[in-house]
């Protein structure tokens, strides 16, 4: 039972490690994580959700897609595309948050946007906590303790100890006689 628990914990720790590596390498593939600050995309993506976005050309999006658009001098906005019209090298996008009753006041002229690949509702609280110094220390300490625990030598109770290994006898060599 203990061995199964150890295996499960080490497996989960390994999976967490792979996720960290994937998150570190994601920007090389044009992917990045974003935390939603407001509830304008609720109930599908409430405030605090974590989104995985792929960097795409503005011309590649269509009505119904969820995109993140950079706004000069303001925070980026993440809303659903209501209308997408090619404009010059990019596109003119009309956006609306799922929780909003009307479209955003002005269309956005964009060359590139972040296209929603996946979203985890309410995962942003954990992500924000891990980004703090205390969160980093807690994760590092937990990972260190897991590794230490999984590699700690096990002592078997005497009543369950393996019997001592049998000594192998070496076969006696017979001298061959010449006939």
Image: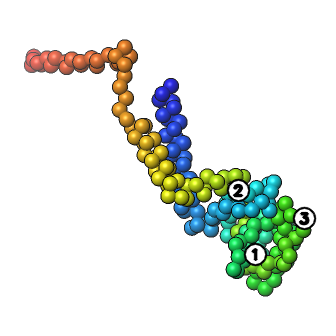
For the residues labelled 3 and 1, the Cα–Cα distance comes to 24 Å
Say if residue 22 shows up in the picture: no
Q: From the top left corner, tell me how far across and down residue 143 is, in percent.
A: 46, 46
> For the residue labelled by badge 2, is the local secondary structure a helix, a strand or a loop?
loop
Give residue 49's mark.
2
Q: Is residue 31 above or below residue 153?
A: below
User: Residue 96 falls in which quadrant of the image?
Assistant: bottom right
| Colour mapping | rainbow
Q: Count residues near mark 2 (Cα–Cα under 10 Å), then give few for <14, some for 14-19, many for 20+.
A: many
Question: In this rendering, which labeled residue sits more in front, label 1 or label 2?
Answer: 2
Q: Count residues near mark 3 (Cα–Cα under 10 Å), then give few for <14, some for 14-19, many for 20+.
A: few
The residue wearing badge 3 is 101
Q: From the top left corner, tell me how far across and down residue 162 is, in percent.
A: 34, 18
Point 52% across, 41% down: residue = 11
> For the residue labelled by badge 1, is the local secondary structure a helix, a strand or a loop?
helix
> For the residue labelled by badge 3, is the local secondary structure a helix, a strand or a loop?
loop
For the residues labelled 2 and 3, the Cα–Cα distance comes to 21 Å
Whichever of callouts 3 and 1 sits on the residue coming sooner in the sequence is 1
Point 19% across, 19% down: residue = 170
Point 45% across, 41% down: residue = 146
Whichever of callouts 2 and 3 sits on the residue coming sooner in the sequence is 2
Q: Is residue 37 above or below residue 15?
A: below
Point 54% across, 58% down: residue = 132
Say if residue 34 shows up in the picture: yes
Q: From the top left corner, tell me how far across and down residue 59 is, in percent.
A: 77, 75
Q: Is residue 53 left or right of residue 28?
A: right
The residue wearing badge 1 is 58
């Amino acid at each position: 039972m203990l061995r199964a628990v150890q295996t499960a914990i080490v497996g989960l720790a390994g999976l967490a490690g792979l996720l960290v590596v994937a998150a570190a390498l994601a920007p090389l593939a044009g992917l990045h994580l974003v935390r939603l600050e407001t509830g304008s995309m609720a109930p599908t993506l409430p405030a605090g959700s974590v989104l995985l976005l792929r960097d795409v050309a503005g011309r590649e999006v269509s009505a119904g897609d969820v995109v993140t658009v950079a706004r000069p001098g303001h925070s980026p906005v993440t809303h659903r595309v209501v209308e997408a019209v090619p404009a010059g090298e990019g596109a003119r996008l009309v956006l609306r948050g799922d929780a909003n009753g009307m479209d955003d006041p002005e269309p956005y002229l964009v060359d590139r946007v972040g296209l929603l690949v996946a979203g985890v509702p309410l995962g942003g609280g954990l992500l924000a906590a891990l980004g703090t110094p205390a969160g980093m220390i807690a994760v590092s300490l937990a990972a260190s303790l897991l590794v230490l625990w999984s590699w700690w030598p096990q002592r078997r109770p005497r009543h369950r100890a393996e019997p001592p290994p049998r000594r192998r006898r070496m076969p006696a060599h017979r001298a061959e006689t010449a006939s």
